[in-house]
């Protein structure tokens, strides 16, 4: 194993990296990024809310929590045909990963879950990497999703363990880690990151990155979200995250987890192309495309296409890891 890919980072080491002068930090991250990844490639993912609103959780940032009045209308689980139609549009527009999100606290073994399994099969058959974010999962449920063809499961840590209770009280940090463990056991790729701008300290950000970077296997995908404050939620008056904080988080994540896809996620709608370019330079190599991220605005496919043209970026092909592995086996 390469010495740069380690899982025993200390908090002190991460703190030192995070506090490196910014231009030096970006240079270091960009150098590692170039070594481990094709820097022209960006994974394009589309996220669809397949069941919106009415969630029983109290996540302080989320417009889909039933207890907040945010103007989000509760919608029942979509039909499989509608979802596949949306997935086809995303594929035609250049997305290679399709993520389905349901505003559930946890997955229940019922007809709705059976319908989601059918959706997973359908998207997988279209040749796209299929991802879900459905809340907490048991080992058996993770196994069923894997058998249906699920490629990745998203379950973010959101923030540090210390700050977590200030943001969410309806479940624990350990609940999060348990679900991630169940996903790993089922052989499904892990997508796990967090949100900055929740009123956390720099220390909290460092601790969250420490939790991610000391997992026995790093998450294959690490979304870095910038809070989009929504009227009606407890965090509606939080100030906008500074672009340099985003760049610092992305660069640090890239150095700690050189092979992960580091995803520039929520908050991208507020960024100029120049600011996004800085994030790509610092090591981001994945974005969400499409007009919405669940319920918050996102740049359109057309805008992203123009940005890719301008920056000389190309969408990463689906199932690239598997194809590389198969090629290596055949060559051997």
Image (cartoon, grey):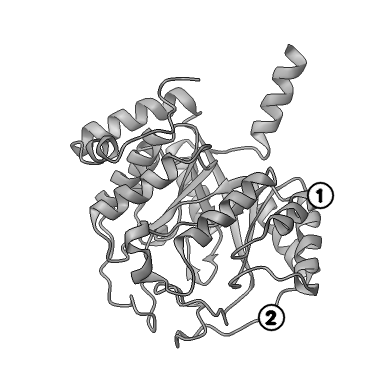
* Along the viewing direction, whichever of 180 and 117 lies nearer the viewer: 180
Q: Residue at x 67, y 26 (%)?
A: 324
For marks 2 and 1 on the same chain, the one whose residue lies earlier in the sequence: 2
* Along the viewing direction, whichever of 170 and 270 lies nearer the viewer: 170
Coordinates of residue 200 in the picture (x, y in percent): 28, 61
Coordinates of residue 81 in the picture (x, y in percent): 80, 67
Answer yes or no: is residue 154 visible.
no
Q: Name the residue under label 1.
A: 125
Q: In terms of image quadrants, where is residue 185?
A: top right
Answer yes or no: is residue 151 visible.
yes
Residue 234 to residue 329: above or below: below
* Along the viewing direction, whichever of 171 and 92 lies nearer the viewer: 171
Residue 315 horizontal side relative to residue 307, left or right: right
Q: Name the residue under label 2.
A: 76
* Along the viewing direction, whichever of 303 and 169 lies nearer the viewer: 169
Coordinates of residue 168 in the picture (x, y in percent): 42, 71
Q: In terms of image quadrants, where is residue 227?
A: bottom left
Task: Give the tally of numbered discs.
Answer: 2
Disc 2 to disc 1: CB gap under 8 Å: no
- Please tell me the numbered disc located at residue 304: none
């Amino acid at each position: 194993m390469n010495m740069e890919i380690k899982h025993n980072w200390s908090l002190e080491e991460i703190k030192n990296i995070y506090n490196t002068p910014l231009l030096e930090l970006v240079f270091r991250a960009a150098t590692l990024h170039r070594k481990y990844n094709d820097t022209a490639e960006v994974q394009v993912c589309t996220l669809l809310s397949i069941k919106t609103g009415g969630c029983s959780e109290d996540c302080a940032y989320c417009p889909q929590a039933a207890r907040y009045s945010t103007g989000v209308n509760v919608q029942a689980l979509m039909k499989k045909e509608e979802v596949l139609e949306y997935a086809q549009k995303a594929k035609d527009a250049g997305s290679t990963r399709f993520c389905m999100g349901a505003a559930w606290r946890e997955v229940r073994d019922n007809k709705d879950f059976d319908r989601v399994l059918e959706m997973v099969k359908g998207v997988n058959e279209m040749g796209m990497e299929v991802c879900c974010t459905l809340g907490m999962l048991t080992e058996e449920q993770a196994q069923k999703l894997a058998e249906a063809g699920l490629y990745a499961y998203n379950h973010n840590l959101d923030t540090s363990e210390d700050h977590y209770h200030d943001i969410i009280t309806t479940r624990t940090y350990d609940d999060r880690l348990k679900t991630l463990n169940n996903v790993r056991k089922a052989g499904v790729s892990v997508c796990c990151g967090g949100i900055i701008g929740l009123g956390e300290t720099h220390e909290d950000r460092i601790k969250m990155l420490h939790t991610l970077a000391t997992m026995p296997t790093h998450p294959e995908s690490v979304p870095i979200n910038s809070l989009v404050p929504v009227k009606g939620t407890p965090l509606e008056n939080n100030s906008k995250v500074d672009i340099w904080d985003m760049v610092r988080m992305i660069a640090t994540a890239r150095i700690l987890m050189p092979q992960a896809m580091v995803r520039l996620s929520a908050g991208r709608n507020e960024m100029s192309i120049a600011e996004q370019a800085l994030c790509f330079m610092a090591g981001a190599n994945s974005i969400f495309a499409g007009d919405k991220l669940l319920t918050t605005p996102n740049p359109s496919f057309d805008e992203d296409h123009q940005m890719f043209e301008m920056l000389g970026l190309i969408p990463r092909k689906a199932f690239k890891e598997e194809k590389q592995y198969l090629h290596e086996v055949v060559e051997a």
